[in-house]
Image: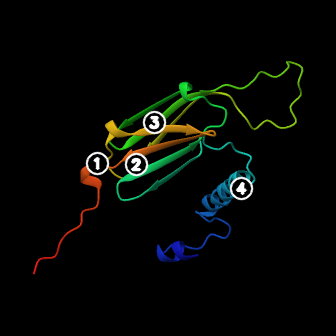
Amino acid sequence: MFFPRFLGMPNIGSMRPFEELNRMRKQMDRIMDSLMDAKAQGLQSGVFPAINLTEDDNHFYLRAELPGIKADDLDIQATGRNITIVGERKLDTEDAAAKYHRREREGGRFSRAVAMPKEIDADRVEARMQNGVLTLKVPKSESAKPRRIAIGS
């Protein structure tokens, strides 16, 4: 082994100072692999609501999937570089004797904050809800918009 020889110490047969650390690292790798497998199989719940964020020269477009949620049950706030969507998902109550075979839909309050890539004009954000999809049209601030630069002769 490198360290005992380097330090001028005799090689003491089975005594390896990093053997226990190596065993612990392998065990942590197995645990992390099992967690990643569970995530890949969809055993963990996702983030709600699912969103897409796109942009053009003047606006960002944030689209959030909110099936079954009414616009009146949402609170949307915009500041500096952040958009926050807060609401409550209300599900019909099941019969108390119902046995679930699969339960993927959860009810209750939710909050989703999205950091925008650039400064926004929070006073001019437009929102509309159609077919369970919330669309926010978020104007970029003047400082965040691309500028055309003319080339002089």
Residue 109, x across and y down, in percent: 59, 27
Residue 89, x across and y down, in percent: 64, 28
Q: Which residue is drawn at the image coordinates 47% and 38% (left, top)?
A: 127
Q: Earlier in the sequence, mark 3 or mark 2?
A: 3
Q: Amino acid at mark 1?
A: Ser
Say if mark 4 contacts mark 2, CB within 8 Å. no
Which residue is labeled 1 in the image?
141
Q: Earlier in the sequence, mark 1 or mark 4?
A: 4
Packing grade of label 1 (10 A; few <14, some 14-19, many >=20) is: some
Q: Amino acid at mark 4?
A: Ala
Report the number of numbered marks. 4
Q: Label 3, label 4: how many angstroms apart (C-alpha)?
A: 28 Å
Q: Which residue is drawn at the image coordinates 77% and 21% (left, top)?
A: 93
Residue 150, x across and y down, in percent: 17, 72
Say if mark 1 contacts mark 2, CB within 8 Å. no
Q: Label 4, label 2: how many angstroms apart (C-alpha)?
A: 27 Å
User: Is residue 117 visible in this depiction of the protein?
Assistant: no
Say if mark 1 contacts mark 3, CB within 8 Å. no
Residue 84, numbered label: 3
Q: Amino acid at mark 3?
A: Thr
Query: Foreground: 39 or 86?
Result: 86
Q: Which residue is drawn at the image coordinates 64% and 64% (left, top)?
A: 15
Which residue is labeled 4 in the image?
40
Q: On the rendered structure, is 35 left or right of 77?
A: right
Which residue is labeled 2 in the image?
116
Helix, strand or loop for disc 1: loop
Say if mark 1 contacts mark 4, CB within 8 Å. no
Q: Earlier in the sequence, mark 1 or mark 3?
A: 3
Front position among marks 1 and 2: 1
Residue 69, numbered label: none
